Image (spheres, grey):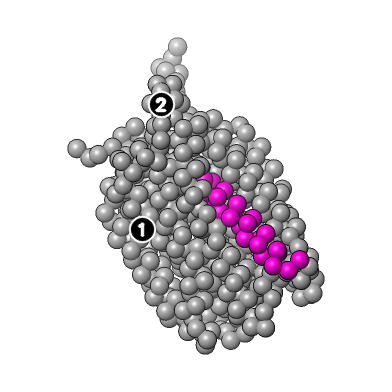
Amino acid sequence: MSANTLDVTASDAARPDTTKVKRAAVASFLGSMLEYYDFYIYASAAALVFGRVFFPSSNPAAGTLLALATFGVAYIARPVGAVLLGHFGDRVGRKRVMLLTLVLMGVSTFLIGCLPTYAAVGVAAPIMLVALRVLQGISAAGEQSGANSLTLEHSPMGRRAFFTSWTLTGTQAGFILATFVFLGVAWLPEEALLSWGWRVPFWFSFAVVVLAYVVRRKLEEPEVFVEEQEHNDVAKFPVVELFRTHTADVLRVMICSFIAVCGTVFSVFGLAFATSHEVGVSKTEMLLVAVSANVLALIMQPTLAILADKIGRKPVFITGALGCAVMIFVYFNAIMTGNLALIFLGALVLTGICYSAPNAIWPSFYAEMFNTKVRFSGIAISTQLGFAAAGFAPTIAWTLVGDSRTNWLPVAILVAVCCVLAATSAATARETYKVPLTELGKPVA
């Protein structure tokens, strides 16, 4: 054998096999795309349609407030789902729970599109809507936690942030897909939109479910998790083990997760606020603004994740969170000017760049705070406790605006405070980008 052949063989042996992690990243991307496709079509429908379809009122603002409240209901169910799905994810396996969450999310979303309206069945309509929204919340509690755990545990050293970032990049793809589908029906005459048009985006989710399910069936459990099962080293009660060994990390991640308030205020409240009669920006323009910002995020998130693999998680997360705290004021001010170019620019910087930083980093940053025994439970429970603030942020924001419907300053202050809290909490965390997988979640000597 020649020296050159030996060199090539040695090089191939040294290069880690990324087949499994690439498959995991694709599966995570598709699952997250479905979750956030469902998330954003619900958000768009709640902001633009549900107030009249399920909560008819002589006061349109009251109907919108009730519709936005149903958006937040899922976040009440999420902590419960996090405990249940986290338990089985840490004991039975990441893959099985990921298949369950995928099917649960897809079925509940499809059924929302089949619901009768308030005019047809009265109060039973919003009750059924809330029940299906709760099922969406339970599913969402385990989706990203399982995807992040599985992808991280398959990832080679030095590329964990990049591969796990595809989970959250799927959220941007889901937003873009949802917005384009909703744009297609938003142009319908109002009577058609309110009768059948709003249902089409919910029915379309079935196609995404089938694609994601096929990919997920081919996943394998990470070696580090399989080894724990083989050695009977799996925690009997992962949630108990989590709070016994990682209480500070749960609290830390929960506060870091307040950054999501920026995302829901931008995507849900911002749409309802800007398109209200008092502010007057067109629905189509605001949907296109949101799409543009998320297209930029598709590029920025993997890029920022690569940067985090080189310089660390904390600098990227903290800089992005503080950037959001500043840019939320710029964005709402731009909306009030009515200048479309300024609105586009504000959205691109706020969501496409600043929010992309913590969004790209948290899948690895949070997951690396926990060991394999409790990683699924740790991410699920701590993030869902924090995300509860994000779920109700649009409703709180709509209340803060008051009767004027143009008083955006209290909303911007609320978002900024949440961003600063997230950045402060992140600053207290251990930097983990150079820590081996088997050493993650262990006390620092």
Query: Measured from the top left, where is residue 272 in percent x and y?
Result: 58, 75
Does label 2 or label 1 sit earlier along the sequence?
2
Disc 1 packing (10 Å; few <14; some 14–19; many ≥20): many
Residue 393 showing in the rendered view: yes
The image's mark for residue 246 is none
User: What's the residue at 60%, 40% (across, down)?
Assistant: 100
Location of residue 243 (image quadrant): top left
Residue 343 part of the magenta-drawn span: no
Answer whether residue 143 is magenta in the image: yes
**Relative to the observer, which residue lies in front, 428 or 54?**
54
Which label number is shown at residue 228? Answer: 2
Where the N terminus falls, by quadrant? Answer: top left
Look at mark 1 in the image and give the residue it sits on. 255
**Horizontal side, residue 192 vs residue 445: left or right:** right
Q: Secondary structure at mark 2?
A: helix
- In magenta, the rendered stretch is 121-144
- Residue at image coords 27%, 47%: 430
Q: Which of the 4 image quarters holds residue 49?
A: bottom right
Amino acid type, mark 1: Ile
Task: Residue at the far top: name it.
Answer: 1
Above/below status of 188 relative to 210: below
Residue found at x 48% / y 47%: 82
| Type of the residue with mark 2 | Glu
* Residue 111 x %, y %: 71, 54
Q: Nearer the viewer, residue 310 or 116?
A: 116
Near-viewer residue (235 or 21): 235
Question: Of 300 and 119, which appears nearest the observer?
Answer: 119
Residue drawn 67% across the image and 83% down it? 58
